[in-house]
């Protein structure tokens, strides 16, 4: 079931949001976020709602709701589903009206919830993309701006044409930034857990920060540093973090097959334990 809150009411199905006179329709002024409801628990909901406000501000939009108001709406929406549901929660802020002018006059808010079971821990394939993330002075790279996802789509299409599900995108220096849709972690042959250090080109995710903290609590340090793409050719584990799948192993990278390793397994278990207590 799809459930959307828009203009003060809840409605089911594919609710129309952008109009022919909305800025976002023509000029891409929209930001969104994603969080999960897992059997009534809402891990890291507030950071995701806080980020949608920050993302909006980066585009000159003003989220019309406070974090508390959004949280109350999310809880109201979740209560309309069965108690054991696994849901995806997506707030959206977009430029309404002002379709002819460079700066939108008004910001609108919508919230969609839908059934989306947690993806299984079976793994995905990825290749190295020819596309890179824009630098911070080229695009609002720290905002979850819908417009940035046009490039994500291009990277995934390119990967798909080569028979892979996801792609590793680099920054303008050629270092690993992230997967097209999520943050990247690897384990070196020496056993060090590494993730690219945030340098403004990619979204330093909420799940990424949570997983670094959970691994630290379990005695596993994560090194944040520049990562050369060649390191992916020798890594003993590669996995991702993101709000949708939380922690998922990469089991095929370019020509290589990788096992689902102990660090990804630990990170997933710790995340689910955290989510169960949230
Ligand atoms: N990078 C990109 C491009 C993403 O779309 C996401 C998912 N929002 C992430 C990283 C992971 O961020 P988070 O853990 O905050 O969802």
Image: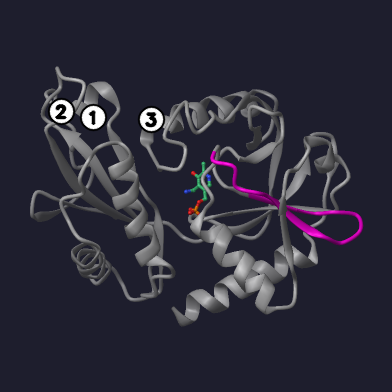
Instruction: Residue lying at the far bottom in this picture: please name it.
Output: 277
134 left or right of 99 in image:
right
Q: Disc 1 on helix, strand or loop?
A: helix
Of labels 1 and 3, earlier in sequence is: 1
Please report the bounds of the magenta region as a residue range: 184-200
Q: Which residue is mark 2?
A: 22
Q: Furthest residue to the left? A: 8
Is 147 situated left or right of 188 in this image? Answer: left
Residue 86 is at least partly visible in this image: no
Residue 91, given in percent of the width and then of the height, sits at 29, 51
Say which element carries label 3.
helix
**Residue behind label 2 places its C-beta within 8 angstroms of ligand 1:** no
| Category of crowding for the residue at label 1, using alpha-carbon neighbours closer than 10 angstroms: few (below 14), some (14–19), many (at least 20) | many
Which image quadrant is residue 162 in? top right
| Label 1 – label 3 distance at C-alpha | 10 Å
The percent coordinates of residue 258 (x first, y second) are 82, 50
Q: The N terminus appears in which quarter of the rendering?
A: bottom left
Observer-nearest of 257 and 208: 208
Residue beneath disc 3: 147
Q: Is residue 195 something that shows in the picture?
A: yes
In the displayed structure, 23 sits above or below 32; it is above
Q: Residues within 10 Å of mark 3 (few under 14, many from 20)?
A: some
Estimate the x, y position of residue 193 in percent, counting from the top left.
77, 59
Residue at x 40%, y 42% (from the top left corner): 143
Q: Quadrant of the C terminus?
A: bottom left
**Residue lying furthest front:** 137
* Labelled disc at residue 24: 1
């Amino acid at each position: 079931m799809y459930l959307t809150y828009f203009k003060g009411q809840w409605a089911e199905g594919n609710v129309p949001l952008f109009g022919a006179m909305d800025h976002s329709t023509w000029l891409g002024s929209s930001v969104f976020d994603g969080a999960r409801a897992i059997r009534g628990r809402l891990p890291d909901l507030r950071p995701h709602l806080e980020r949608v406000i920050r993302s909006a501000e980066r585009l000159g939009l003003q989220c019309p709701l406070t974090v508390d108001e959004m949280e109350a709406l999310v809880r109201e929406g979740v209560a309309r589903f069965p108690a054991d549901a696994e849901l995806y929660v997506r707030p959206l802020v977009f430029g309404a009206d002002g379709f002819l002018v460079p700066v939108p006059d008004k910001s609108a808010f919508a919230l969609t919830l839908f059934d989306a079971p947690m993806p299984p821990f079976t793994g995905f394939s990825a290749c190295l993309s020819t596309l890179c993330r824009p630098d911070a002075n080229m695009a609002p790279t720290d905002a979850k701006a819908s417009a940035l996802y046009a490039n994500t789509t291009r990277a995934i299409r390119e990967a798909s044409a080569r028979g892979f599900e996801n792609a590793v995108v680099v920054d303008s220096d050629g270092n690993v930034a992230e997967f097209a849709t999520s943050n990247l972690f690897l384990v070196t042959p020496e056993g060090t857990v590494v993730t690219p250090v945030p340098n403004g080109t990619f979204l330093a995710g909420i799940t990424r920060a949570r997983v670094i903290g959970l691994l630290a609590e379990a005695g596993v340090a994560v090194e944040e540093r520049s990562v050369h793409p060649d390191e992916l050719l020798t890594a003993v584990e590669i996995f991702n973090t993101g709000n949708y799948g939380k922690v998922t192993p990469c089991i095929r990278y370019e020509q290589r097959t990788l096992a689902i390793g102990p660090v990804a397994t630990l990170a997933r278990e710790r995340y689910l334990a955290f989510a169960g207590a949230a």
